[in-house]
Image (cartoon, helix red, strand yellow):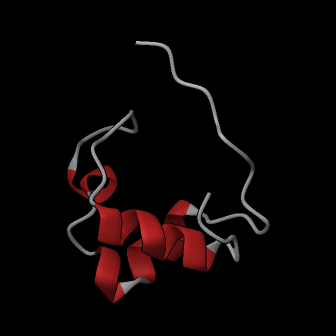
Amino acid sequence: MELAPVKALTAPVTLERIRKDARLRTFPLLTRGRLSVVPVTPAQFRRVLELGKTPPP
């Protein structure tokens, strides 16, 4: 599968920041044993954009 970013986040969203966010507690990135491409719900995607101070594409 080929993936490419649509645009960069305005502010970085670190793994530590994601771990501390209660709304992202079930984010697959945190529940898998290693970092990789994971499915993301629309709500999780919106939250990561919020944390990254980036409007939706």
Q: Which quadrant of the structure image shows residue 6?
A: top right
Q: Residue at x 53, y 75 (%)?
A: 17
Q: Residue at x 42, y 63 (%)?
A: 45
Most distant residue in the top direction: 1
Percent x, y of residue 1: 40, 12
Percent x, y of residue 39: 27, 44
Q: Which quadrant of the structure image shows residue 52?
A: bottom right
* Left or right of 9, for residue 18: left
Q: Nearer the viewer, residue 39 or 28?
A: 39
Q: Which quarter shows the C terminus?
A: bottom right
Q: Nearer the viewer, residue 34 or 23?
A: 23
Q: Nearer the viewer, residue 40 or 21?
A: 40
Q: Which quadrant of the structure image shows residue 20?
A: bottom left
Q: Nearer the viewer, residue 50 or 29?
A: 50
Percent x, y of residue 5: 64, 36
Q: Residue at x 24, y 41 (%)?
A: 33
* Left or right of 21, for residue 17: right
52 in relation to 39, above or below: below
Most distant residue in the right direction: 10
6 in relation to 18, above or below: above
41 in relation to 33, above or below: below
